[in-house]
Image (cartoon, coloured by chain):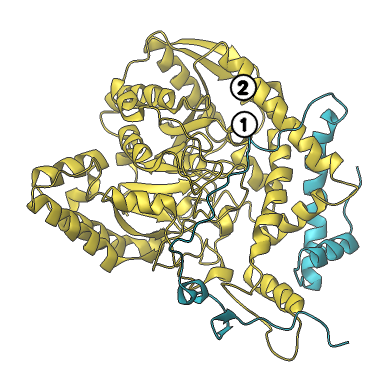
Chain colours: A yellow, B cyan
Amino acid sequence: MTELIKFTAAETAAAISKGEVSAVEVAQAHLDRINAVDEKVNAFLHVDTEGALKAARTVDDKRARGEELGPLAGVPLALKDVFTTKGIPTTCGSKILEGWIPPYDATLTSRLKDADVVILGKTNMDEFAMGSSTENSAYGPTGNPWDLSRIPGGSGGGSAAALAAYEAPLAIGTDTGGSIRQPGAVTGTVGVKPTYGSVSRYGLVAFSSSLDQGGPCARTVLDAALLHEAIAGYDPLDSTSIDAPVPAVVEAAKRRDIRGMRIGVVKEFAGEGYQAGVMQRFNESVELLRELGAEVVEVSCPSFTLALPAYYLIAPSEASSNLARFDAMRYGLRVGDEGGRSAEQVTALTREAGFGDEVKRRIILGTYALSSGYYDAYYGSAQKVRTLISRDFDAAFAGVDVLVSPTTPTTAFPIGERADDPMAMYLADLCTIPSNLAGNAAMSLPCGLAPEDNLPVGLQIIAPAMADDRLYRVGGAVEAALNDKWGHPLLEEAPAL
Amino acid sequence: MAGITREEVAHLARLSRLELQAEELDHFAEQLDVIIGAVARVSEVAGQDVPPTSHPLPLTNVMRADEVRPSLTPEQALSGAPASEDQRFRVPQILGED
């Protein structure tokens, strides 16, 4: 049954629906794979064997009763450990939540369950989704299945690695500054940041509320679209949820025709700091878009060069406020509650013991940026930059349907290489951050291997808010053309684990 | 643009309820100085007549009817608490003795 783990989500669902294989067999094949390789990969923080098999049995029972199954019924999924799961630990990769078992499900979790998706477990991540390498997890780093000594991207490195290691055909990530797309790019998988507000944030443990967005991770564009439709849509429990129809992304993914589309190449995402092999594969992708019948033009978005600094003021500012809830009183760790210490002292000792370096660094930075005397210079200015970036997008989208760029400036770097240099680490999200600041939709999909290191390169596609279907239309066409050219999906070139 | 000193980091840590160690203060002061130097570029646009954007969506306050409905039980709400007593969160002393 090893072939079952190579199936796409669409193939798995079809096979289950036709009765060619049972959902329990599919779940077991993936649980076996996790048992076999996850010691090396460390993609999972918690594997819910019992729950997964129970959910799979429910699907098989429904089929036996002749009930109609949904498009992803029985398909296994790896869920980033930042979404609450009733009865299953949720740690956000942090010691401060070690052992915490939420009493409720996130809306996204409920929707997956309602769609009969089989949740295998919770995936490793940078603590509270802060990072670009999954090295900031309190539970050890995740390895990139292409080369276990390299990072799988972050903060959703566990979700991306689970896909690339064939531990799950589907995964969920969250993208605050690129945490779905950047891991997708460096692991040779597909990652989508949907339009901000189109997937509920209820039960998503908040890092930076105006930027955080849950979204699909998969090995194919169609699989990502199927998952996108399962999780998106209005949620009255989230005050930032958009009450509008979800674009027809599955239909768009199947279309595979981009003739007549206008595509803009973002001029600012090139030059110093961009790996030669990344630019080579990107330029070939642009050529491919032309061959497929799109009109490609160069577009300038001058404010994008200020996106990274603006992000590193806005995200830590919101984080310093959001993480105030970890006060050692209502849930999580409590340290120093003896010897007559005050609540304030216990909170400070607990946060010192429970948070890792990156989280502390951002809390301090955010507190600084929001402090009186610096507010206008830092946080206020960053918000003005946000306006300028939105204007750049508006101007660009007045002339083109989508924008393209490399997803990341480099391929996966070795674990530890940037650990002591936060600014170098932050550069990994250079190309992904503008879409978070503006709230629009973006996708990363594999576009080849960099010749110098044989590691995956991601192509980023950016669409206006609520035009997520355009990502899938372009992504589906590019993926089909590249698979034809290569003779197989890129991931098949990854070494066996 | 001003840099950040070890003393400022210590002050910010107190405001943030973080009991940082001495070596962390040194380490963070050095790193935050570099980060703040790099992000200060945003202030180049501060003088311009640009309205700030705090959120990608226009936010409105959401109200719901004030109706009794099922919620978490006290046991569920307290299930993750470090300490509880008589169906309440037990916390260390909040007010000083003096």
The secondary element bearing badge 1 is classed as helix
Q: Is residue A334 visible?
A: yes
Locate residue A101: give its quadrant.
bottom left
| Disc number placed over residue A393 in the picture, else none | 2
Amino acid at circle 2 = Phe
Is the C-beta separation of discs 2 and 1 under 8 Å? Answer: yes
Q: Nearer the viewer, residue A400 or B63?
A: B63
Quick one: quadrant of the N terminus of chain A? Answer: bottom left
Q: Position of residue A202 (x, y in %)?
A: 50, 51
The secondary element bearing badge 2 is classed as helix
Chain assignment, label 1: A
Decide if residue A471 is on the left or right side of residue A15: right
Q: Is residue A356 visible?
A: no
Residue at image mark 1: A438
Label 1 Cα crowd, 10 Å radius (few <14 / some 14-19 / many 20+): many
Quick one: quadrant of the C terminus of chain A? Answer: bottom left
Q: Residue at x 69, y 40 (%)?
A: A311
Label 2 Cα crowd, 10 Å radius (few <14 / some 14-19 / many 20+): many
